[in-house]
């Protein structure tokens, strides 16, 4: 009888102690919680509340009837998903999205790490600061301006087109964006130029927290700069690298539509059209809201699956992960 009472009251005691600890923590860190409150409200209002609208992916959405008043789609609400899977554009959209994302990942993910390692080796403080400012300055340029500059540079009379034309690599009479084979390199390289410095900041922060005694011990053991980088620097920031890699893998299917819409044209849809631009055209231009919502939901589910899978794999291989 005594044992059963103990078992029955243990969870209640734990629950009470949790709320007591939470109440004490709220009083102790009141200012920190007040600062966090706007962030919480932002995510609740703009990220979680709109998830209610996902229902239209399973309905034949009619605006004047509303979400709940609109009729359910055929095939138990799966009509729009089936139409997308059977669409002639399905394979092309998946192929283009994966091609752009994986190429972008392979090029732009290691580049900030290399830049951070190189900047970390610069001894002159002012020179290092100038280099860092110069590399992350493009991040603050508007996407519209960036795409305008790219279009101007690769136009038929742009300096990049003319330079490659003199080398015999491209046709100098046409814009490089009129050739479907050049879209992915232009997209990835321009993205690298825009983001490399900004993305390097988090790795520079991680490098600043590396214990300097580890370097001293490595030097005593006879390690040169390269060996110190391999055996001290990289292992010290490995957790940061893995976290960033998992997040990047989780957005492989989430290629943003803004830059692509500003750069592409119907002549290069074969390599430039991705899921997000397809959703934009179907949802906003053609007013096919339910179909666009279904395609977008499919994309989000795949991204979530990739995050969970990447986290499990990295935990098994390196014993590190987001959760």
Image: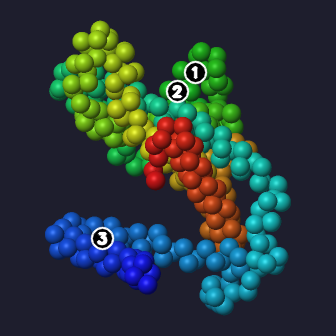
Q: Which residue is label 1 attached to?
A: 164
Whole-percent x, y for residue 67 in the image = 62, 84
Are there few (<14), some (14-19), or many (20+) residues within 10 Å of tag 3? few
Q: Which residue is mark 3?
A: 38
Q: Disc 3 on helix, strand or loop?
A: helix
For the residues labelled 2 and 3, the Cα–Cα distance comes to 45 Å
Image position of 211 with respect to 166: above or below: below
- Which x, y percent locates residue 261? 58, 52
Residue 3, given in percent of the width and then of the height, sits at 42, 78
> Image point 25% across, 77% down: which residue?
20
| Placement of 198 over or under 5, stated as above or below | above
Q: Is residue 82 left or right of residue 27?
A: right
Q: Quadrant of the N terminus?
A: bottom left
Q: Are marks 2 and 3 in contact (CB under 8 Å)?
A: no
Q: Does residue 22 show up?
A: yes
Residue 195 falls in which quadrant of the image? Answer: top left
> What is the C-alpha distance between the residues marked 2 and 1?
6 Å
Q: Are marks 2 and 1 in contact (CB under 8 Å)?
A: yes
Q: Is residue 2 above or below residue 78?
A: below
């Amino acid at each position: 009888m005594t044992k059963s009472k103990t078992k029955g009251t243990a969870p209640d005691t734990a629950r009470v102690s949790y709320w007591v600890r939470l109440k004490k923590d709220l009083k102790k860190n009141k200012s920190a919680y007040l600062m966090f409150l706007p962030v919480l409200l932002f995510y609740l209002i703009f990220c979680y509340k709109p998830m209610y609208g996902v229902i239209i992916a399973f309905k034949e959405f009619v605006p004047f009837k509303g979400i709940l008043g609109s009729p359910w789609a055929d095939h138990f609400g799966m009509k729009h998903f089936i139409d997308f899977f059977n669409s002639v554009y399905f394979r092309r959209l998946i192929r283009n999205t994966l091609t752009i994302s994986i190429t972008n990942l392979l090029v732009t993910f290691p580049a900030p790490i290399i830049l951070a390692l190189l900047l970390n080796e610069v001894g002159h403080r002012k020179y290092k600061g100038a280099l860092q400012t110069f590399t992350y300055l493009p991040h603050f340029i508007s996407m519209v301006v960036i795409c305008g500059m790219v279009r101007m540079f690769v136009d038929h009379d742009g300096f990049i087109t003319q330079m490659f034309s003199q080398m015999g690599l491209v046709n100098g009479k046409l814009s490089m964006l009129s050739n479907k084979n050049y879209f992915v390199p232009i997209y990835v390289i321009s993205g690298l130029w825009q983001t490399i410095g900004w993305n390097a900041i988090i790795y520079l922060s991680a490098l600043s927290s590396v214990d300097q005694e580890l370097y001293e011990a490595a030097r005593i053991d006879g390690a040169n700069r390269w060996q110190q980088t391999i055996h001290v620097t990289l292992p010290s920031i490995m957790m940061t690298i893995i976290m960033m890699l998992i997040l990047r893998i989780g957005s492989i299917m989430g290629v943003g539509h803004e830059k692509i819409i500003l750069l592409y044209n119907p002549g290069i849809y074969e390599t430039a059209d991705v899921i997000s631009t397809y959703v934009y055209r179907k949802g906003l231009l053609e007013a096919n809201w339910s179909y666009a919502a279904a395609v977008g939901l499919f994309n989000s589910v795949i991204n979530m699956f990739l995050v969970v899978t990447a986290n499990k794999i990295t935990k098994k291989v390196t014993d590190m992960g987001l959760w």
